[in-house]
Amino acid sequence: MSLDRYGVLKGRVLDHRREPDDDTPHYQILIDGDGSARAAVNVLSSGQESDPKMSELLYVAVEDFQHPILADLEKLKDGYKELDRKPGGLALDYIRGSLFDRTDLRALPAHEPGEDNDLADVLDHYVTRAQANNGSRIYAFGEPWSAEKEADKVFRFRPGRGIHNIHMNQGSAGRFKGDNGVWQDGALLFHFPAADRWVAIFLAFQSQRWHTDDRTGGALPDVPQARPGGQPAEGEPDQRLRIVGALVNAVGPSPEDESVTLINTTTESVDLAGWAIADRDQHQVSLPARTLAAGETIRIPLVPPVALGNHGGTITLLDAVGLKVDGVAYTAADATEEGRTVVF
């Protein structure tokens, strides 16, 4: 199972509205993208968690977002674009796409009295900025709903239509398990051309698992639940080793000179047998079957079919059971100079 449809809505921000109802609070955004459409953004979980703090959504706002998808995103026309749910394209996957550092996620209440202390305030900051500048564009990733017979229930345009599920769409349990899938995560991206800047907002529910099945997007049963606030729990593999550098544009035409540099950030030796590095298209190369001491670095030469590419890409480190340990992204600008190692 997965979302019925998945894509991205691009357009101008025309209006916005907080909707602090008691059931499923949303932040509503009116977008002009080849006609009016509404983006309904969850700001509180409707899972009825016993602890109210667990109903708070996790979020991260990346102020200077850099990723290889941006060049192709900017080329899209205003309006809705259906996306193929696979690696190497415009589809988003929080786990496999190296979009942000998981440890940067924070939980925030939906609506609180005062300023700059809730998720709606965070959204206000970027939405109002985009609304004030006609040259700016918003990109809402998620699941669209079809044109309605009635006027839109929030902004009253006709016919009502829009996009929702603008959050992580995998690793869910219970009644939301049927929405799980890979390469179909939601997000909000803002492009401010005058400042030559992209901002990205990623949202997830605290009940969602971070490590999921590569085929179904369902939670893996043998991986611990994250700590409250979304931080990795003991027993999760996140950032045991880090990707600290990569030679993505080797001197000369041979791709065999590309490499990735890793460091062991733990206090113990790590057995690399069975570990692998994956590129943007999910091609993999195995790491040498050796032990990496605490604090030690290792340079991994890459061989086909793994290729980093000079137009931007991602690099993912997988442990012996295929779980993501670390991931980074680089852009075409990073790969301009031959022979230069990109530092992450």
Image (tube, rainbow, N blue to C red):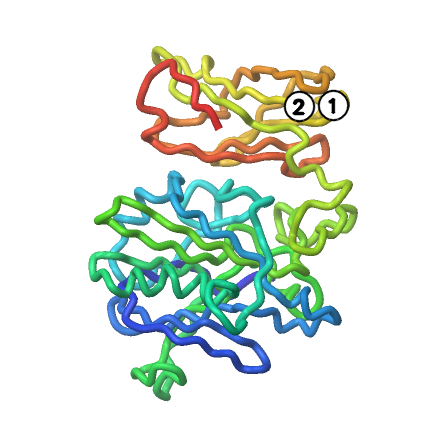
Crowd class of label 2 (few under 14; some 14 to 19; many from 20; radius 10 Å) = many
Which one is earlier in the sequence, the residue at label 2 or at label 1? 2
Q: Are marks 2 and 1 in contact (CB under 8 Å)?
A: yes
Taking depth in this image into account, of 67 and 117 the one nearest to the observer is 117
Taking depth in this image into account, of 304 and 74 the one nearest to the observer is 74
Q: Quadrant of the N terminus?
A: bottom right
Q: In the image, residue 50 lies at what x, y percent?
A: 75, 71
Q: In the image, residue 92 lies at what x, y percent?
A: 47, 50
Q: Is residue 146 left or right of residue 292?
A: left
Check residue 270 in the rendering and tell me which mark sits there, or answer none: 1
Which of discs 2 and 1 lies nearer the camera? The answer is 2
Residue drawn at the location 68% of the way across and 31% of the way down: 240
Q: In the image, residue 284 lies at what x, y percent?
A: 57, 28
SS under mark 2 = strand
SS under mark 1 = strand
Q: Is residue 216 left or right of residue 174?
A: left
Crowd class of label 1 (few under 14; some 14 to 19; many from 20; radius 10 Å) = some
Check residue 264 in the rendering and tell me which mark sits there, or answer none: 2
Taking depth in this image into account, of 103 and 12 the one nearest to the observer is 103
The answer for how far apart the CA atoms under marks 2 and 1 are is: 7 Å
| Residue at the far top in the pictured view | 252
221 shown above or below 147: above
| Location of residue 153 (image quadrant) | bottom left
Image label count: 2
Q: Amino acid at mark 2?
A: Asn
Residue drawn at the location 45% of the way across and 61% of the way down: 122
Q: Amino acid at mark 1?
A: Val
The answer to whether residue 212 is seen in the rendering is: no
| Residue at the far front in the pictured view | 114
